[in-house]
């Protein structure tokens, strides 16, 4: 029943879209069919795959860096409370600031290349990854730490066997949220930098009034992001079986 | 009747943290000034130069013009998003069929890179300031819907049953139990939505590069006016913090029982 | 919808509380999916009587209470309150809940007024009546406190005040003291009996405490589990008033509790 409703909503969406394309609302509003054809053409020509690879490259670079830097930093913040208390003020500011505002600065200082794209992705995702790792450590049940100490656990054992496993769900949640933020950062970066990648494809198609191509690329980007997040969600569930 | 004990005080928000926050910011300001003076990079000017630039831009009206355009778009986009978002969230929370149809869409779009939709908005509206309001709407709408819906669905069954036992019909149950019960979640959604709205405002303005603070960011970036760029970034941060504070105060004022 | 009030509008303001009425449960059965919760349950409660429902887990005592309250409709049989069949929540009945069911966003005063509000009382009347019952349950001075500031025992007093404020003829109580510590519970039991003797409502009380059952009631109905049926009905001929007496220390009391335990033990 639920599946029928969901499929029904997709069909309804397509129908509304088709109708919107027919109505002379604005110039060149592409229909679902036109979008699909454009999508196929873009894949065939190699433009979409190439753009995807470039974009994903920046994403992995920036997001990877965010995880490699963010998780240890967050863990450190959690284990050294004064450091944590101080650093989180800066992280809160970074999270409050609309990160897109930093893009012109990045362009100025780093230029327009794959690295600047990655830097922006990093800026979008690292604060969240860090804050979540920090939160994970802070929320370790004191009881468990007490218990381990009562058994004379060394500092290393305490960290590896109590703190880390307890913090893991929040760390993973932070990584998953960080990935969705990384995609947001990627798209913002590419739309503003637009020398290459999916963002360039979107902006170029728009400026050439090839709206069917633009729609196709936008849709593709959204689906890509959704797919990546779903995959990560699956992995997270696997690793956190004990939580159920 | 036997006498009862003293009431416990309502849990308050921690106060001691404020000093640490201020100290941290002062430290940052100090480091910034020193690093800037040391001329480590032309892209890190000293805080004092940024302050001077900010003052200049404030005095000649540039900041005021840009900020008011931005804020107007913000309100134009956020208010409909709030009204429609809460309405849809309430409906989806209350009617399971509607929820099953729409929640896949709403949940996906909530965390999707919505900036990808801004070019679509530009195609729809052309390069004009309406795009900014539309971007603000799109960025904030979904998070408001999801939080409102969650709030309604989280209503305790026993409270609804209690209301039924006193004769409350569907409408009374909704008005007197579901709605107040969902209020904390609705306020959370509006707070998050407000933060998202500011982001949508900045992204939208940067992409159309026509008006507002976003346009100034692009302009100063293109013309290498670094201190002016920093001045605008700081302004954007202050506005973002202001909006967030406003939302938090509204939350505290309305949700007075937690 | 079965939410429509079936009784005529009882006058809200009163100097004299409304007289209590009797309950007749006739051959009630209820199933949830493939599980039969109650099968052919017949119980009669006289006006002004204090009856307890007790039994092992899964015997359907809470379900039966909800059926009497009109919140759940039986599959078979019927319930009569004051001679008229129950088709939905009734004006004559008022419930007290195990988890208190207080509105967290409302003050004590507003919570006690809630039942009156839903039944159409006007603001001025509501406030006056509510204030009276807040005092009656010993919470004078706490009218503006929120549930989060109160202990479990105090919260349940609010629940009781709310239930009494609508001047019910029947009081239905679903393990009301289960979430309260024993010392507070004993005090509360005495307070309940004191209030009850003032306004002799018909009370149907659900509990799993045998001692509580014997202490409070005129009769104890023992239900057997899965499916719930009336297994035995015990008379409790202990004299009243029982609050603030040493009845718990008497031989009679101990014997009754022991009998009840013997019956229940066989049902486990």
Image (spheres, coloured by chain):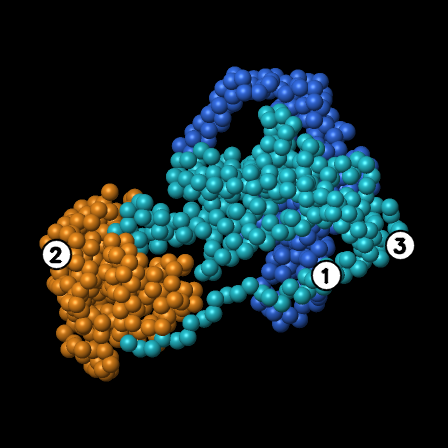
Chain colours: A blue, B cyan, C orange
* Residue at the left extreme, as displayed: C83
Q: Label 1 to label 3, Cα distance in Å? A: 21 Å
Q: Are marks 3 and 2 in contact (CB under 8 Å)?
A: no
- For mark 1, what is the residue? B24
* C139 to the left or right of A147: left
Q: Secondary structure at mark 1?
A: helix
Q: Mark 2, chain letter?
A: C
Q: Which residue is mark 2?
A: C82
Residue at 54% of width from left, 17% of height from top?
Answer: A24
Dot 3: chain letter = B
Q: Which mark is residue B38?
A: 3
Are marks 3 and 2 in one subunit?
no
Q: Quadrant of the image for the C terminus of chain C? A: bottom left
Residue C58 image offset from top left, x and y in percent: 29, 56
- Going from N to C along the chain, the mark reached first, 1 or 3, is 1
Residue displayed at 69% across by 62% down: B22
């Amino acid at each position: 029943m639920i599946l029928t409703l969901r499929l029904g909503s997709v069909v309804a969406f397509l129908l509304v879209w088709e109708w919107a394309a027919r109505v002379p609302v604005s110039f060149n509003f592409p229909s679902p069919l036109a979008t699909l054809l454009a999508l196929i053409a873009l894949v065939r020509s190699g433009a979409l795959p190439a753009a995807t690879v470039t974009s994903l490259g920046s994403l992995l670079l920036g997001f990877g860096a965010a995880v490699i830097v963010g998780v240890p930093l967050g863990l450190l913040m959690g284990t050294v409370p004064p450091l944590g208390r101080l650093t989180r003020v800066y992280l809160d500011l970074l999270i409050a600031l609309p990160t897109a505002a930093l893009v012109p600065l990045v362009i100025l200082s780093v230029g327009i290349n794959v690295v600047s794209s990655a830097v922006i992705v990093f800026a979008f995702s690292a604060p969240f990854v860090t804050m979540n790792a920090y939160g994970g450590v802070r929320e370790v049940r004191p009881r468990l730490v007490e218990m381990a100490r009562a058994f004379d656990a060394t500092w290393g054992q305490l960290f590896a066997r109590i703190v880390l496993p307890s913090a893991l769900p929040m760390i993973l949640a932070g990584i998953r949220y960080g990935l969705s933020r990384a995609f947001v950062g990627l798209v913002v970066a590419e739309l503003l930098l637009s020398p290459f990648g999916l963002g360039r494809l979107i902006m170029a198609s728009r400026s050439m009034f090839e709206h069917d191509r633009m729609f196709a690329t936008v849709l593709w980007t959204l689906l890509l992001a959704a797919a990546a997040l779903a995959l990560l969600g699956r992995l997270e569930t696997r690793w956190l079986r004990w939580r159920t | 009747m036997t006498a009862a004990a003293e009431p416990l005080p309502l849990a308050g928000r921690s106060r001691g943290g404020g000093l640490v926050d201020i100290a941290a910011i002062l430290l940052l300001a100090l480091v910034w000034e020193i690093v800037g003076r040391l001329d480590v990079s032309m892209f890190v000017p000293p805080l004092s130069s940024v302050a001077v630039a900010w003052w200049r831009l404030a005095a000649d009206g540039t900041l005021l013009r840009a900020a008011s355009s931005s804020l107007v778009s913000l309100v134009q986009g956020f208010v409909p998003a709030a009204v429609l978002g809460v309405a849809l969230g309430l409906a989806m929370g209350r009617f399971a069929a509607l929820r099953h149809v729409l929640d896949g869409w709403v949940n996906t779009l909530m965390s999707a890179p919505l900036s990808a939709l801004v070019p679509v908005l530009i195609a729809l509206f052309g390069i004009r300031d309406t795009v900014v309001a539309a971007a603000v709407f799109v960025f904030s709408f979904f998070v408001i819907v999801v939080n409102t819906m969650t709030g309604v669905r989280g209503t305790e069954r026993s409270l609804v049953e209690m209301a039924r036992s006193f004769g409350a019909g569907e409408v009374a149950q909704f008005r007197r139990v579901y709605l107040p019960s969902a209020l904390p979640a609705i306020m959370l959604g509006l707070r998050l939505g407000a933060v998202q709205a500011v982001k949508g405002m900045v992204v939208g303005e940067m992409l159309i590069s026509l008006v507002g603070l976003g346009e100034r960011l692009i302009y100063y970036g293109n013309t290498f006016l670094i201190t002016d760029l920093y001045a605008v970034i700081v302004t954007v941060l202050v506005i973002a913090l202001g909006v967030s504070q406003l939302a938090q105060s509204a939350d505290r004022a309305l949700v007075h029982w937690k | 919808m079965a939410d429509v009030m079936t009784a005529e509008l009882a006058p809200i303001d009163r100097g004299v509380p409304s007289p209590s009425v009797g309950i007749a449960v006739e051959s009630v059965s209820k199933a949830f999916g493939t599980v039969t919760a109650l099968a052919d349950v017949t119980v009669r409660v006289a006006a002004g009587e204090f009856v307890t429902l007790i039994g092992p887990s899964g015997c359907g005592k809470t379900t039966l209470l909800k059926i009497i309250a009109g919140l759940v409709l039986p599959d078979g049989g019927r319930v009569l309150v004051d001679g008229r069949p129950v088709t939905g929540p009734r004006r004559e009945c008022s419930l007290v809940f195990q988890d208190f069911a207080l509105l967290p966003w409302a003050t004590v005063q507003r919570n006690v007024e809630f039942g009156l509000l839903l039944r159409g009382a006007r603001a001025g009347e509501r406030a006056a009546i509510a204030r009276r019952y807040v005092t009656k349950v010993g919470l004078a001075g706490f009218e503006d406190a929120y549930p989060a500031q109160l202990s479990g025992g105090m919260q349940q007093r609010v629940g009781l005040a709310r239930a009494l404020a609508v001047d019910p003829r029947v009081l239905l109580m679903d393990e009301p003291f289960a979430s309260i510590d024993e010392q507070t519970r004993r005090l509360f039991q005495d307070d309940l009996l004191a209030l009850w003797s003032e306004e002799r409502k018909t009370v149907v009380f659900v509990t799993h405490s045998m001692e509580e059952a014997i202490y409070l009631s005129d009769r104890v109905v023992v239900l057997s589990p899965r499916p719930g049926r009336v297994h035995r009905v015990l008379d409790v001929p202990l004299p009243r008033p029982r609050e603030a007496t040493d009845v718990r220390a008497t031989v009679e009391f101990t014997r009754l509790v022991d009998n009840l335990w013997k019956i229940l033990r066989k049902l486990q």
